[in-house]
Amino acid sequence: MKLPIVLGLAAALTLGSAQDTQKPGQPPTPDPRKGKYGYRDKGGEFVIAPQFDYAGEFSEGLAVVGLGKFPATRWGYINLQGQVVIPAQFDGAHDFSEGMAAVGVGGKLGYIDRAGKLAVPPQFDEAQKFIGGRARVRIIKSGYGYINRAGEFVVPLQP
């Protein structure tokens, strides 16, 4: 008889902690409202009004946002105050990691810095986040390799 009570308490504790994932000082989280995304604080209040067609989590103080319905979506970045800091100009965009983010331009991926400047020209078919100063990239016909933040191969492409 005690087992269901223990399980019930465990489930309640698990549900409570899952809903309260944002700790004080953490960035707001995306939340859809009437077909647009905005960002809510821990208390559930919108701190960035719903205005984006798509919205990602914050990383390094910036969040990926999409404007326009698929397949015409253009991607850019906002800061914690909801201000567009990198205009929605990319075909695709990924989270920032070590000050760089992979973005799509003309069917290829390259990397921008936090100012939105293209740091590594679009040339890859796949581009992962930077970890330890290196990012894994792929060119379909040539294979996988690793580049540094300057776009130089530190591990050459290999099939």
Image (tube, rainbow, N blue to C red):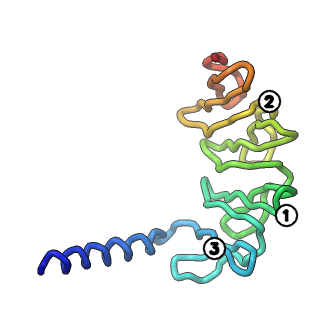
Q: Residue beneath label 3, please?
A: 31
Please tell me which residue is depicted at 62% across the width and 25% down the height of the picture.
146
Please tell me which residue is depicted at 63% across the width and 22% down the height of the picture.
145
Work out whether mark 2 precedes mark 1 in sequence or the reverse, and give the earlier one: 1
Residue farthest left in this picture? 1
Front one among 4 and 105: 4
Q: Residue beneath label 2, please?
A: 123
State the image coordinates of residue 44 (x, y, percent, origin top left): 56, 82
Secondary structure at numbered mark 3: strand
Q: Amino acid at mark 1?
A: Gly
Q: Amino acid at mark 3?
A: Asp
State the image coordinates of residue 56 (x, y, percent, origin top left): 65, 60
Q: Which mark is residue 68?
A: 1
Distance between mark 2 and mark 1 Cα atoms: 25 Å
Residue 18 appearing in the image = yes
Q: Which of the two discs, 2 and 1, sits closer to the camera?
A: 1
Please tell me which residue is depicted at 74% across the width and 49% down the height of the picture.
93
Q: Amino acid at mark 2?
A: Gln
Mark 2, residues whose alpha carbon is within 10 Å: few (<14), some, or many (≥20)?
some
Secondary structure at numbered mark 2: strand
Residue 129 in which image quadrant: top right
Mark 3, residues whose alpha carbon is within 10 Å: few (<14), some, or many (≥20)?
some
Mark 1, residues whose alpha carbon is within 10 Å: few (<14), some, or many (≥20)?
few
